[in-house]
Image: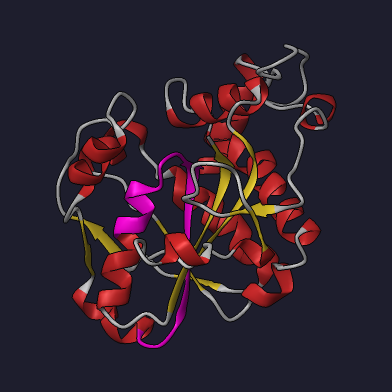
Amino acid sequence: MENFLEKFWDMFFPKKCINCQEFGDYLCVDCLSLIEVLQDCYCPFCNTPTIVAEGKTCRDCSHNHYLNGLFAATSFQNSIVKKAIHVFKYPPLIKSLAIPLTSLLITHLELASVKHKLTDFIIVPVPLSKTKLRFRGFNQAEEIADILTKSIHSQIQNVLIRTRNTRSQVELSRIERKNNVDGIFAINPKMISIIKNKKILLIDDVFTTGATIDEAAKVLKQNGAKEVWAAVIARE
């Protein structure tokens, strides 16, 4: 049914690149090639970008955070990336942008030589609030996770539950963001045994201060996860 609706939509509204406006796809090959994919990994929380081995949170930051490390494909400052993620998340909600965006993440994992190490990780998409999920009709993190899972031959589990709505993080300070997300996640009671002593890879689209993802990592570790890492399309 979904394929039929997509073909019907394409018949009347042909796919057009969000950047160069050429017909054919929502993000053409030429424009996709203009996005620099990072080879190095950086500490998720250092104020000054710090290159770290295999994406690990640096020793100093690890004392104050729960996330073991981060894989980020590219910079959110790239205008094409910013536009693509905006269209992916907000009207007109082009769901199929998950494919080229996730390809950037897969390329990053290959360049960083860590892709083969993720096969024993459980893939956990960061959940949306019920309000946002109803509005969008899908969770962009789940779309990314679904494609990534097939590439690294792992398994996806919707372990986390969002317990309440929050204010938008965009205009909040670092401290306000941390307070805003405090206690917003819980573990699905039926899945607690699944994460015991397991390595978790959280999936989201953008990493800013990391407050949301670190809160998710905290809850997962409090419920027995051995390690919690994250993978995103872009970071600010």
Q: Residue furthest top?
A: 21
Residue at 46%, 53% (x, y): give it: 142
Q: Residue furthest front?
A: 60
Count of labels shown? 0
Residue at 75%, 32% (x, y): give it: 35
Q: Is residue 113 left or right of residue 137?
A: right
Q: Is residue 52 left or right of residue 37?
A: left
Q: Is residue 124 visible?
A: no
Q: Is residue 197 above or below residue 160?
A: below
Q: Is residue 189 left or right of residue 113?
A: left
Question: Percent from the top left, x then y, of residue 96?
Answer: 59, 37
The magenta stretch spans residue 91: no
Q: Is residue 215 above or below residue 135?
A: below
| Viewer-side residue, 212 vs 31 | 212
Residue at 59%, 74% (x, y): give it: 154
Q: Is residue 120 above or below residue 21?
A: below
The magenta stretch spans residue 202: yes
| Viewer-side residue, 50 vs 209 | 50
Question: Percent from the top left, x then y, of residue 73?
Answer: 66, 46
Identify the image's colour scheme: rainbow, by chain, secondary structure or one colour.
Answer: secondary structure
Q: Quadrant of residue 91?
A: top left
Q: Is residue 76 visible?
A: yes
**Magenta segment:** 196-215
Question: Percent from the top left, x then y, of residue 192?
Answer: 27, 81
Q: Quadrant of residue 180?
A: top left
Question: Percent from the top left, x then y, of residue 46?
Answer: 50, 48
| Viewer-side residue, 60 vs 156 | 60
Q: Quadrant of residue 150?
A: bottom right
